[in-house]
């Protein structure tokens, strides 16, 4: 109850105060700042995926503006020589307003990345977006088979079946590239696992299935138990280090991240930036109130 109360209060606190915590986890407000941080990560042996902060919108005019921003992000990142790809949230392009408009916008973004032989990943949002996001993947992959990927959330009970149902798109030449994460949205226990051990169990089952099917999993976690479980699966299936990668959030568990890089594993860091950082942070708190106590400690430690 205390965490929930804090998470409801923080959105009304001064942005400057919340920024004391947030600045370590946001790569800046502009693409120029994000590029500087992405290049630093590259120099430390890590790849990146750049994301413009922002999710649900209320008008299609916003969707068009967001598409134009992503096109600019790609152009500037490629010109700067960033070793990384791009992540986007489909609701940022109007998925829940007009799925066809969202498809056209996202297709244009993917086409831009493909012109540089690069890649875009569709982030998975809450459960009303799951089927729509899978449909986006199927449609865009027909035209850009090497340049599009998706995210799956291990806590959703449907995820293993979704991976199986998409296996028809997998091939040795172009393996499916899916990010597996735990999931942070507050979903019903009818459709989502809630217990830590259960979520981890299904996370590793999903990764194992992808190894078995010769897919390319991007293992997005900061949980040492999941990392160690994944490394055991790598040994079990003798998976080449170019057939998977770990992914972590900007500013989170740098020591664990470095240890994996030092051991020769591919690492990609999620680099979020944008003027909507405040809304991003406060929404995440509402979705996962357990973060609130950690944030309050960080704010007063830094102040």
Image (cartoon, grey):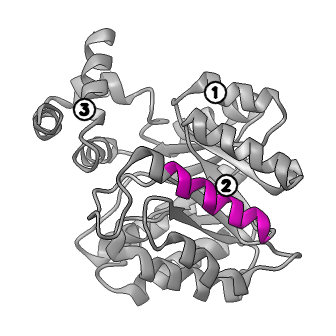
Q: Residue placed at 44% from the left, 36% from the top?
A: 26
Q: Residue 93: x, y in percent? A: 40, 72
Q: Is residue 285 above or below residue 217?
A: above
The quarter in which the C terminus is drawn is top left
Asked if residue 63 lies left or right of residue 35, the reply is: left
Q: Residue at x 69, y 66 (%)?
A: 209
**The magenta segment:** 200-213
Which badge, 3 or 1, is on the more N-terminal residue?
Answer: 1
User: Based on the displayed image, in which of its 4 quarters is residue 108 positioned?
Assistant: bottom right
- From the image, tell me which residue sits under label 2: 218
Q: Quadrant of the N terminus?
A: top left
Q: Which mark is residue 256?
A: 1
Say which element carries label 1: helix
Q: In the depicted view, which residue is nearer to us: 23 or 249? A: 249
Q: Residues within 10 Å of mark 1 (few under 14, many from 20)?
A: some
Q: Is residue 208 above or below residue 265?
A: below
> Magenta region, mostly helix, strand or loop?
helix
| Cα gap from disc 3 to disc 1, whole angstroms | 23 Å
Q: Is residue 89 left or right of residue 179?
A: left
Residue 82 visible in this rendered orientation of the protein: no
| Residue at the (62%, 62%) spot, across then down | 206
Q: State how far apart marks 3 and 2 are (Cα).
A: 27 Å
- Residue 162: mark in rendering: none
Coordinates of residue 13 in the picture (x, y in percent): 13, 30
């Amino acid at each position: 109850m205390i965490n929930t109360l804090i998470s409801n209060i923080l959105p009304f606190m001064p942005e400057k105060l919340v920024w004391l915590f947030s600045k370590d986890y946001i790569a800046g407000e502009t693409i120029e700042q994000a590029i500087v941080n992405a290049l630093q990560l590259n120099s430390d042996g890590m790849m990146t995926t750049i994301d413009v902060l922002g999710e649900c919108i209320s008008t299609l005019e916003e969707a068009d503006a967001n598409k134009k921003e992503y096109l600019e992000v790609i152009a500037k990142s490629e010109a700067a020589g960033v070793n990384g790809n791009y992540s986007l949230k489909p609701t940022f392009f109007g998925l829940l307003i007009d799925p066809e408009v969202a498809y056209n916008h996202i297709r244009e973004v993917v086409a831009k990345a493909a012109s540089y032989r690069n890649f875009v990943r569709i982030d998975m949002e809450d459960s009303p977006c799951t089927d729509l996001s899978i449909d986006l993947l199927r449609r865009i992959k027909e035209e850009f088979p090497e340049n599009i990927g998706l995210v799956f959330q291990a806590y959703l009970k449907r995820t293993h079946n979704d991976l199986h149902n998409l296996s028809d798109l997998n091939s040795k030449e172009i393996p499916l590239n899916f990010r597996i994460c735990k999931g942070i949205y507050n979903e019903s226990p009818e459709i989502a696992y809630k217990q830590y051990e259960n979520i981890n169990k299904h996370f590793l089952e999903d990764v194992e299935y992808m190894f078995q099917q010769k897919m390319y999993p991007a293992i997005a976690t900061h949980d040492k138990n999941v990392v160690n479980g994944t490394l055991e699966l790598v040994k079990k299936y003798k998976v080449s280090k170019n057939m998977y990668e770990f992914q972590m959030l900007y500013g989170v568990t740098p020591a664990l991240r470095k240890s994996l890089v030092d051991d020769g594993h591919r690492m990609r860091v999620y680099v979020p930036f944008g003027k909507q950082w405040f809304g991003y942070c406060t929404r995440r708190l509402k979705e996962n109130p357990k973060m609130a106590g950690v944030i309050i400690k960080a704010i007063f430690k830094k102040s």
